[in-house]
Amino acid sequence: MIMRRDFLVPMLIALVAGAAATAACKRPLELGDPLRGLDADQRSQFDRGRAVFDQVFTAETGLGPLFNGTACATCHAQPVSGGDGPISEIHATVFRAGGFCDPLVERGGPVYQQQFTQALRDSLGLSSEPIPAEAARATRTTPDVFGFGLLDAVPNATIMALADPDDADGDGISGRVNRFFDGRMGRFGRKALIPTLAEFNEGAFPIEQGVTVPNSQSEGTVGGAPIPPGVDPLPEPELNAGLVALTDAFVRFLAPPEPTKLTNEGRRGEQLFTEIGCASCHIPTLKTGDHPVSALANKEFAAFTDLLLHDMGSGLADICLGLVAEPSEFRTEPLIGLRFAQRFLHDGRARTVEEATVLHGGEAAASRNAFQALSESDRQAVLAYLGSI
């Protein structure tokens, strides 16, 4: 049978297009890529949001007058937009009698900006925000934000099911939920203070860049003192809701890097990681729930966290935060993209993954001791596994 050309040509075109689409789907994600499965509009939001994320603000376009960085990417750019960065910032709170954690909001806290615009420096003769003498201080490095949309989509019920505040199972691990100032469950930030990714993303503009947004139209204070008149030339808000939403879309749709293929040594390390107890807090996989964005709905992903607070011992303690987190408590750090990190622990004091592991204390002391008791080859196997994440 001879096939007609007017039928054969369209069929061949369809086959070629289908093969190309299949090949594209199978292409490994590169660092900085969006999640698979976004529709055309969501992909456009991601691309346009990256431009806002990378935008450098000046005093004339809304920067300051107090700030820590001039762009989102100032802090989150290594090795691509959305990664970590070299900047550290200062947080401060006071742990009052009776267990009340004072975030010092009326005195400029809990995040203290370390840079001023020229107009504010000239007006006050200062170059950074003063911190109350009685406050405990904390240094915070900036984490990468890979996979944060997936972390946001994990149901609260999943996190609650992992909590064991009274260590009822007797394993020495007593993770608990932190609460925002209004009582909602927190999950973002080193102390799991911020409840949602939208709040985390939007709040970074006024807190880190001094750029006001529709939900936060105050320029704040300088350590509690009013900002002098005339140093902030733009009306509020300085960034509109549409641009805030695009930035949120970029972070929300930013894919986690795919783990590299494990070697035999890495597979042995994966088993040891569980055997010595690291996986009790750094839970290797979590699953999202129902979600209006199909790319985020019911997805299992490599999270390496339980999003809970754990006592890490007095050696790492710094500040309290929120309604629950005491100075020695920190949220289990998601290890998403660990192999690209350049500084480790919440304050960057560790130079390597191994050093960070050895500095674990409190609830993690048993796992730390088990890691140190491993043979050299087994320790290297665990590190090889972690180097694949």
Image (spheres, rainbow, N blue to C red):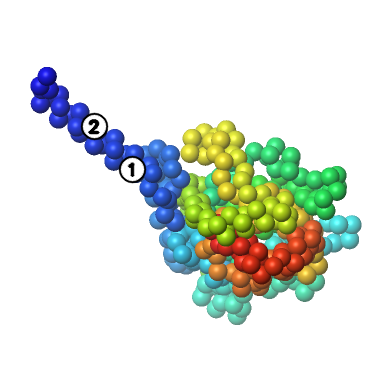
Q: Is residue 22 visible?
A: yes
Query: Residue 246's spot in the image, x, y percent?
Result: 45, 48
Residue 274 horizontal side relative to residue 237, left or right:
right
Q: Residues within 10 Å of mark 2 (few under 14, many from 20)?
A: few
| Image position of 220 (left or right of 293) | right
Residue sitting farthest toward the right: 98
Between 234 and 294, the one nearer to me in the picture: 294
Task: Give the residue drawn at x 32%, y 39%.
Answer: 21
x, y percent for residue 5: 10, 26
Q: Measured along the vertical axis of the image, is residue 125 above or below residue 347?
A: below
- Which quarter of the rendering shows the N terminus? top left
Q: Residue at x 69, y 62 (%)?
A: 110
Inspect the image, locate mark 2, and give the three-letter code of the amino acid beneath it. Answer: Ala
The answer for how far apart the CA atoms under marks 1 and 2 are is 14 Å
Estimate the x, y position of residue 86 in percent, counting from the top left.
54, 71
Where's residue 166, x and y in %? 86, 47
Q: What residue do we see at 64% from left, 38% from top?
A: 155
Identify residue for label 2: 14
Camera-nearest residue between 219 and 269: 269
* Numbered disc 2: secondary structure: helix
* Residue extending farthest top: 1
Front-most of residues 156 and 110:
156
Pick whichever, 30 or 143, lies toward us.
Answer: 30
Q: Residue 23, labelled with which disc? A: 1
**Residue at 48%, 49% in the rendered image:** 255
